[in-house]
């Protein structure tokens, strides 16, 4: 594919300015024009990509310079954008906000520079008029390597308000590419960890995306936005698209993707069951692609619905999500809890992150879970959030001792104890600690990791599936 795919980065001065509304609406609006749109999200967020996928019909993908390293941002972008006409990248937090104490690393500005992509700044104009010019001028001039190609004004109250804003912005020299009025129907409900995932809203999520698209179509200059995207030029550094088989396995890759439980598959391969459904929505698309490239047959199952693991399961991956919201339903599915416990007791590889960790505990908020780990989990008021620099304490089904990976924590729960006799990770930094559990074939931890940064993780896991 050409490394000059048209692209835009949708950023904002701060969280809550309307990035998700504009980015998702713009993706859907471009798709309605017949363009193949590649959706991306800066940072470790799992929820926004679900809305992006609804808008475009393609898998939403993350670009995280902390988890994967700056050198993989371009290749992962090109992998996701393969065969697309245009790409839209939604930023994270404020334009220049990145990993704490790491300068610009993993900020929206950093990713925009790595992609050499023009930035469209979404500004919440609800409580200002002429001051908007000073705000936009500051963001546009802060880093000369970041090209702010235009601004979209959000939550504009009236025609007169719009007139005042446009007059002020003429002095800033940044073109206005869109003006959006206040519209409650495009809002998406939130709870303790952010937006409610698409998998939990179903029809309501579709309606929300349609409303976002309608607002963008009505208020934005799509022609000017597309022209700005097409002026981006080539992705710098001569990047080639990332491929799941390029570093994880020399064997021919099987087609990327997954099947539903119960489908007949005419090839012999270790079956890796991946938890899905409303309780387990957090997953990076590249994980499935890496497992498949390493020779696994990936089959999804829903712990809220399915009472059995997929037939011939030899490995289990349980990612993140909201088990605390569905604790009663998960607990009530005793046959599946028993099946998970029996699989783990057999020594089969089990990889669990955050929500998966809670599901493997003896109980969650007093309700019985799988009992694989001699630990108890409960909800708290305290939010644990941030990037983590980690090293594998010992050998496990995911990594050899000493393997260094970067992760991300995001939860309001606590597990007691926080680490087993054999911890999963040693977390480096000002307050070093150990966390997580390694026992037989189980690797369970609060840390979300991106396996593209260390593709040997998937190969190692699949290899263990054949020997358990």
Image (cartoon, rainbow, N blue to C red):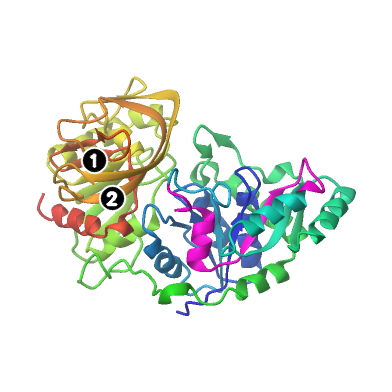
**Magenta highlight on residue 424:** no
Q: Nearer the viewer, residue 467 or 305?
A: 467
Quarter of the image for the N terminus: give it.
Answer: bottom left
The reply to whether residue 423 is in sight is yes
Residue 205 location (% of width, % of height): 59, 47
Residue 307 location (% of width, % of height): 30, 39
Q: Is residue 260 left or right of residue 204?
A: left
Q: Is residue 426 left or right of residue 52?
A: left
Crowd tier of the residue under label 1, counting other residues whose Cα lies within 10 Å: few below 14, some 14–19, many 20 or above:
many
**Sequence-earlier tag: 1 or 2:** 2
Q: Secondary structure at mark 1?
A: strand
Name, please, the residue furthest toward the top: 366
Name, please, the residue furthest toward the right: 160
Residue 322 location (% of width, % of height): 42, 36
Residue 120 location (% of width, % of height): 65, 60
- The residues colored magenta run 102-131
Q: Which residue is mark 1?
A: 425
Residue drawn where x is 53% and y is 55% of the image: 108
**Magenta highlight on residue 125:** yes
């Amino acid at each position: 594919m050409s490394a000059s795919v048209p692209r835009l980065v949708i950023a904002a001065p701060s969280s809550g300015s309307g990035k998700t509304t504009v980015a998702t609406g713009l993706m859907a609006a471009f798709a309605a024009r017949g363009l193949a749109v590649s959706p991306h999200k800066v940072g470790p967020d799992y929820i926004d990509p679900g809305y992006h996928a609804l808008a475009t019909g393609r898998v939403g993908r993350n670009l995280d310079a902390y988890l994967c390293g700056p050198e993989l941002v371009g290749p992962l972008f090109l992998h996701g954008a393969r065969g697309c006409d245009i790409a839209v990248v939604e930023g994270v937090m404020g334009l220049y906000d990145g990993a704490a104490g790491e300068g610009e690393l993993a900020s929206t500005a950093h990713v925009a520079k790595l992609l050499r992509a023009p930035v469209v700044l979404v500004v919440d104009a609800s409580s200002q008029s002429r001051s908007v010019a000073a705000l936009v001028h500051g963001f546009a001039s802060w880093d000369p390597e970041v090209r702010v190609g235009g601004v979209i004004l959000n939550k504009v109250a009236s025609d007169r308000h719009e007139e005042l804003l446009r007059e002020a912005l003429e002095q800033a020299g940044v073109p206005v590419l869109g003006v959006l009025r206040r519209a409650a129907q495009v809002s998406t409900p939130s709870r303790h960890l952010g937006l409610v995932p698409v998998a939990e809203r179903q029809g309501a999520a579709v309606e929300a995306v349609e409303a976002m698209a309608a607002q963008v179509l009505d208020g934005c200059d799509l022609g000017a936005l597309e022209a700005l995207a097409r002026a981006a030029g080539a992705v710098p550094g001569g990047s080639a698209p990332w491929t799941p088989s390029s570093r994880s396995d020399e064997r021919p890759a099987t087609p990327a993707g997954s099947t539903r439980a119960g489908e007949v598959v005419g090839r012999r391969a270790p079956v890796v069951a991946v938890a899905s459904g409303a309780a387990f929505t957090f997953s990076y698309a590249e994980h499935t692609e890496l497992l498949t490239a390493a020779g696994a047959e990936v089959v999804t199952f829903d712990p809220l619905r399915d009472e059995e693991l997929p037939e011939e399961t030899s490995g289990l991956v349980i990612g993140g999500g909201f088990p605390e919201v569905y604790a009663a339903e998960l607990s009530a599915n005793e046959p599946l809890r028993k099946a998970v416990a029996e699989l783990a007791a057999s020594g089969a590889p089990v990889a669990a992150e955050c929500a998966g960790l809670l599901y493997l505990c003896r109980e969650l908020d007093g309700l019985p879970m799988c009992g694989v780990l001699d630990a108890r989990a409960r909800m708290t008021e305290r939010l644990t959030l941030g990037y983590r620099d980690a090293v594998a304490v010992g050998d496990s089904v995911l990594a050899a001792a000493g393997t260094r990976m970067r992760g991300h924590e995001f939860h309001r729960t606590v597990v007691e104890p926080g680490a087993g006799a054999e911890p999963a990770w040693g977390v480096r930094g000002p307050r070093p600690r150990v966390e997580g559990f390694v026992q037989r074939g189980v690797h369970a931890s609060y840390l979300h990791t991106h396996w593209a940064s260390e593709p040997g993780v998937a190969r190692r896991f699949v290899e263990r599936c054949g020997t358990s």
